[in-house]
Amino acid sequence: MTFFSWLSMGGYAAYVWPAFGIVFSVLAYNGVNAYRNYRAILKQLRLSYETSHAPHS
Amino acid sequence: MSLWTLWYRLTSPKDFTYVASACIPWLTVSCLLCLAYGLFASLYLAPADYQQGDAFRIIYVHVPCAFVSLLIYGALTIAALTSLVWRVKLANVFVDAAAPTGAALTLLALVTGSLWGKPMWGTWWIWDARLTSELLLLFIYCGIMALKNAFPDKRQGNVFKNTFVLIGSVNLPIIHYSVAWWNTLHQGSTFKLLGPSKIAPAMSQPLTVMLLAFCLYAALVILLNMRNAVLLECHRARWVGTWLTKRDS
């Protein structure tokens, strides 16, 4: 099987590749988004934690 | 430690955050490994179907999406009941965190089913029992998400939302048995977790790996979302500061 015959998916490339593409784009977006939110929360927590524990001048 | 103490500890926001933070890296690695092998096996190793050709490969994303969308709703039902009966706060956090993941997977099951239906059935959509009940599941998920902040009184809102989850669970057996109860265009179940499957091992093995990968993915994203919610809710608690210092050191 050549690379191009595999890519053509027996003539069903227009259905198989979009199906896999859409699923993995949505899954990746959801996962990355949840992790990015976590990073943002950590940043916010550190900031509030540092200000509340800052030594009085 | 008794089972009751373990349950009590795991449902406390503090212990949950520690346990979730320990589980997340393992879940990420195992999910990525399963996905990598599952993708390779489903797109390359599995043989083409004798009738459907390579179009059948859509099964490797369609079935896991549909299966996990139902699995999440099952878990949502248990969580809603736990929240209503025992007022466990974390159960509520679970409902809020899992609903968007469930909705995304339901939508993906519908879209991939549509992409599979066009070349095989000759139509993108038909008002068949399986398709309609899965669409209803999507609407129910959207309803749960909409109810999250719909009430000014959060406690009252949670009671309403969890009752809605319980009522919506009636749809679960309907989706599962729709292909058996009605004469539908959607095929009957080819893959069974318990009992013999109607699918060849060379085709079912990649499907099992993909099912596992999607379950791990759902667990990972739900845990990430739950931890985010817990940290935001408890940001003033002393343990969050300790957890943060331990994490950074």
Image (cartoon, coloured by chain):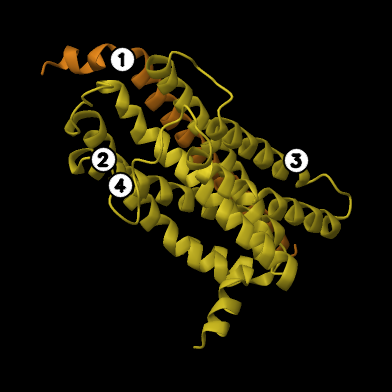
Chain colours: A orange, B yellow
What whole-number distance in Å separates the C-alpha atoms at marks 4 and 3? 33 Å
Residue A50, x across and y down, in percent? 65, 59
Are the residues flagged by discs 4 and 3 from a single subunit?
A: yes
Cα distance between the residues tagged 2 and 1 = 21 Å
Q: How many marks?
A: 4
The residue beneath circle 3 is: B146
Neighbours of disc 4 within 10 Å: few (<14), some (14-19), many (20+): some
Q: Type of residue at label 4?
A: Thr
Q: Is there one chain holding both mark 2 and mark 3?
A: yes
What residue type is disc 1 on? Tyr
The image quarter containing residue B140 is top right
What is the chain letter for disc 3?
Answer: B
Mark pair 1, 4: CA separation: 23 Å
Mark 1: which secondary structure? loop
Residues at marks 3 and 1 touching, judged by CB atoms closer than 8 Å: no
Disc assigned to residue B208: 4
Label 3 – label 1 distance at C-alpha: 38 Å
Q: Residue furthest left?
A: A1
